[in-house]
Image (cartoon, rainbow, N blue to C red):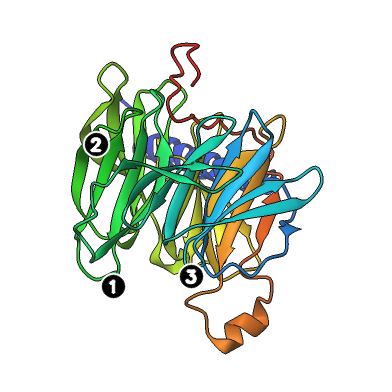
Amino acid sequence: MIRPWLRLSFVLVLLLILVSSCKSNSEDQTQQIAKAPETKVELELEYQAALGEGPVWNAKTQELYWVDILSKQLHIYNPNNKENRSIELPGLVGTVVPFTSRQAVVALENGIYKVNLKSGDLQLLSDVEATQPENRFNDGKCDPNGNLWVGSMNLAEEAATGNLYKIAPDGTTTKMLDSITISNGIVWDRRATTMYYIDTPTGVIRAFDYDKNTASISNERVVVKVDPADGFPDGMAIDENNNLWVGLWNGNAVIQYDPKTGATLQKVAVPAHNVTAVAFGGPDLDVMYITTARVDMTEEELEQYPLAGSVFRYSPGVKGQKADVFGQSRFTSNTP
């Protein structure tokens, strides 16, 4: 038989151990957060893009492709000589992905095109939404099989009239999701088994199982809920550890999320109000390029953030994953 006073003493000791353990765990967590890189965001290319978007690193040429949607421009930036070359396009351009040494693929407001990087000449690939003037194409990236996944959005940003499409290298177009308002960030994990996707107004990041044999998706679920105080999730990149880096519209920041837990791992302040997208680049994919915009800003905000619309760089302390290329599968050596 245990005496009452002895039982009470045992309980008190146990409580002290639990409190001490919780405190220790809390201190460990604080120390882990404190270990996050303290490198500040730096200006890479000063520019007044109305709506800078869609950065993607061409590993073969060591150049950054990006677009200014509202100015109808495709930009090709070389970090080595700091040269930014612009190609004027005939319509709003939502995104760009690498293709061959002579061509890239762009999403214009009336279709998907191959664009000659020297002449600017266009070759139609898909006119899937040519008869939907209430929409325009927005963000998009290539999947591990070399297909372009690109989403459309409602021009007024009010109705869910957008869709997410898969465009095969031969132009075959398949609708993968509908009822989208502002289609944005889309990435695949290292094993090519999971796709992550953002429809901005929902304030969440969704995950889907990705079947690399059929390039199809299933098993939709929410893996990250973005705090409304942080802004709206926009473009996205994925690092070598399968963590997600997201630009925050109206958020002045890029945030790193763990899709396994939904936790915020790191928040990086950016000297621009509307942070649109991020991309890993550099020879070792250890540099993060960040695009920003000047639209949707008050005069006071423009005075506070005069570099809005520029491209910034950041050293995140982790490498990114190599961007997939249109018409090229991760699983074969065939290159167009």
Q: Picture coordinates of residue 206 (x, y %)?
A: 31, 44
Question: Is residue 3 at least partly visible in the picture?
Answer: no
Element at badge 2? strand
Q: Give the label, 2 or 3, closer to the camera.
A: 2
Where disc 3 sits, the SS reads: loop
Of residue 144 and residue 255, the one placed in the foreground of this image is 144
Place residue 58 in its image quadrant.
Answer: top right
Front in this rendered view, residue 110 or 31: 110
State the residue position of label 1: 156
- Indicate the amino acid at tag 2: Thr
Name the kind of residue labelled 3 in the image.
Answer: Asn
Q: Is residue 180 above or below residue 242?
A: below
In the image, residue 212 lies at what x, y percent? 32, 19
Residue 171: x, y in percent?
30, 33
The answer to which of marks 2 and 3 sits earlier in the sequence is 2
Helix, strand or loop at mark 1: loop
How many residues crowd mark 1 within 10 Å: few (<14), some (14–19), many (20+)? few
Q: Which mark is residue 173?
A: 2
> In the drawing, what numbered circle is on residue 250?
3
* Label 3 CA crowd tier, 10 Å (few <14, some 14–19, many 20+): some
Task: Identify the residue at image location x=57%, y=34%.
Answer: 102
Looking at the image, residue 31 lies above or below residue 190: below
How many angstroms separate mark 2 from mark 3 (CA)? 33 Å
Sequence-wise, which precedes: disc 1 or disc 3?
1
Residue 209 has which mark? none
Residue sitting at x 69%, y 35%: 62
Q: Residue furthest top?
A: 332
* Of marks 1 and 2, the one in the foreground: 2
